[in-house]
Image (tube, grey):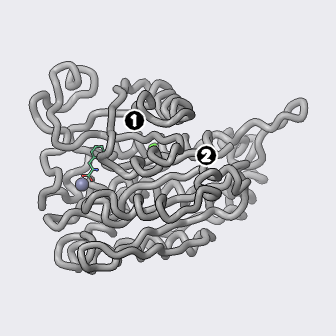
Amino acid sequence: MITRRSPAVVALLCATVTALVPACATAGAAPESAGVVAPQAAPDIPVADVQAHLAELSRIAGENGGNRAHGQPGFRAGLDYIKAQLDAAGYTTAFQEFTIGGSTGYNLIADWPGGDENATIMFGGHADSVNAGPGINDNGSGSAGLLEVALTVAEQGLAPAKHLRFAWWGAEELGLVGSTNYVESLPDTEIAKIAGYVNFDMIGSPNPGYFVYSSGSQPPGSDQIEQVLADYFVSIGVATEPVEVGGRSDHAAFARAGIPTGGTFTGAEETKSADQAAKWGGTAGDAFDPCYHRSCDTLDNIDEPALDRNTDAIATAVWTLSA
Ligand code: DPN
Ligand code: CA
Ligand code: ZN
């Protein structure tokens, strides 16, 4: 069980110690000058909190036949875990149902109340694993990182100008089914309200690369998302490479609908080159994730610094793109 600080407690602490704790200057009201309100700085998300969600997803898979795959009980149990935390934090959550392969699938959609719904910014990743294993890197990592950032939004009482929506997709592993279903179920008037979609699928690969989705072949506006993510990694001194993810993850349906997209990725079955090992460490000639789609995609299959940096990148993108 994870206990969380309430915004009221943070405010109280900061009211008493602002002079001593610089973080309080940004955790509370944004500084104001000449009538311009600077956006709040994104918080540094403790990676231990993300690992705690991964431990829960691992336990849930273990209690449900060893996976969190579409049509299997572990998928819905994992999604219920995520939903319960969001509900307790004040999100408005809903399941969107669909049918594929003779089973019901679910997307979990979580709206943070407030902001301009005509400018909705979305962040998401898939919540299903393959049948072979618990899917802790693919895509427990993105699911857990998104969850912890969403909970931090609530904890800090973020009041963004844009409306903020998070999504955990079902049946990605069956061909991007959940996210495609979501986008295709929206009328054009609703599509027009989505200012962007940012995707996180595999962000803790054990032999990690630091990839940012290339905006080159994506809809206009995608360059801003790529820039925010790339700038974050520059700020922490980590080199990135642009990657063409194409139709391999859940941003694809959004891109087809003309919505700006982006995301980060630490690599799957492809092998790390000597150049990449020189700048990122790890093992040249090995896959970024040797356990991709295998039973060994467990809690041991996570590089903690990669998970930490990419979760902080999610937070930066949420804070910056919603402002
Ligand atoms: N879509 C991922 C999977 O679930 O198998 C793999 C992947 C993620 C590939 C991101 C490319 C980029
Ligand atoms: Ca962090
Ligand atoms: Zn996969």
- Does 300 appear above or below 8? above
Locate residue 110, reporting x and y percent: 55, 66
Res. 164 image quadrant: bottom right
Q: Quadrant of residue 72?
A: bottom left
Name the residue nearer the viewer: 30 or 169: 169
Locate the N terminus and report the quarter of the image it occupies.
Answer: bottom left
Ligand 3 visible in quadrant: bottom left
**Front-most of residues 294 and 171:** 171
Q: List the residue tagged with mark 1.
A: 213
Q: Which residue is mark 2?
A: 195
Q: Amino acid at mark 2?
A: Ala
Q: Position of residue 118 (x, y in %)?
A: 70, 53
* Mark 2 or 1, nearer chain start: 2
* Cα gap from disc 2 to disc 1, whole angstroms: 17 Å
Q: Is residue 56 visible?
A: yes
Instruction: Look at the image and tell me whether residue 304 can be seen.
Output: no
Q: Is residue 185 above or below residue 105?
A: above
Helix, strand or loop at mark 1: strand
Q: Against 144, is 318 above or below?
A: above
| Farthest residue, direction right | 34
